[in-house]
Image: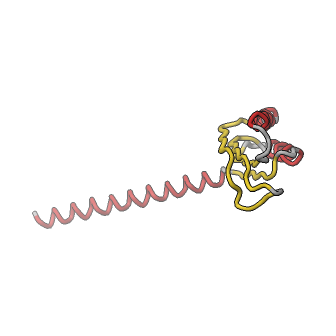
């Protein structure tokens, strides 16, 4: 199977200790690597206020993983999220499409700028020739 880039966010309950959060993050990182994924970044956002109450919590401890893997890696990670009582919410999205769209937009922008430069240089040449 082909490897895709994913971004996974999970929110841990605020009533667990910092050591427990670190252990939880380490466990999820291990799940990614043991299932054939490669972990690119781990961002620990820390304790943040939730937009709405989830399981009677107003705050949560946010952590974001960016990794490359296949569908089996994502399935196992999400299965472990569901089994862990400390995780109150999670979301995993594929980032590849977004990166492709950004690259495509940048390429179009460069082409447009090149055409604009070409038009301005040709118009400058014609105006200088008319003066001479």
Q: Position of residue 130 (x, y in %)?
A: 14, 67
Q: Position of residue 51 (x, y in %)?
A: 70, 60
Q: Position of residue 107 (x, y in %)?
A: 49, 54
Instruction: Pick whichever, 80 or 11, lies toward us.
Output: 11
* Picture quadrant where residue 56 is located: bottom right
Quarter the N terminus occupies: top right
Tell me if residue 126 comes above or below residue 36 in the rendering. below
Quarter the C terminus occupies: bottom left
* Picture quadrant where residue 20 is located: top right
* Relative horizontal placement of residue 111, taking residue 38 as reference (left or right): left
Tell me if residue 67 comes above or below residue 115 in the rendering. above
- Which residue sits at x=82%, y=43%? 77
- Which residue sits at x=73%, y=42%? 3
Instruction: Pick whichever, 121 or 68, lies toward us.
Output: 68
- Which residue sits at x=63%, y=54%? 98
Q: Position of residue 13 (x, y in %)?
A: 79, 47
Tell me if residue 126 comes above or below residue 107 in the rendering. below
């Amino acid at each position: 199977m082909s490897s895709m880039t994913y971004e996974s966010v999970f929110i841990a309950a605020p009533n667990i200790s910092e050591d427990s959060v670190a252990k939880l993050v380490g466990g999820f990182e291990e799940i990614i690597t043991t299932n054939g994924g490669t972990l690119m970044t781990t961002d620990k956002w820390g304790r943040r206020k939730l937009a709405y109450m989830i399981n009677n919590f107003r705050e949560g401890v946010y952590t974001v993983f960016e990794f490359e893997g296949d569908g089996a890696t994502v399935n196992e990670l999400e299965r472990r999220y569901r089994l862990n009582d400390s995780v109150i919410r999670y979301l995993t999205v594929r980032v590849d499409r977004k990166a492709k769209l950004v690259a495509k937009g940048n390429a179009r922008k460069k082409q447009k700028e090149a055409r604009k430069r070409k038009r301005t240089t040709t118009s400058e040449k014609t105006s200088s020739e008319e003066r001479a």
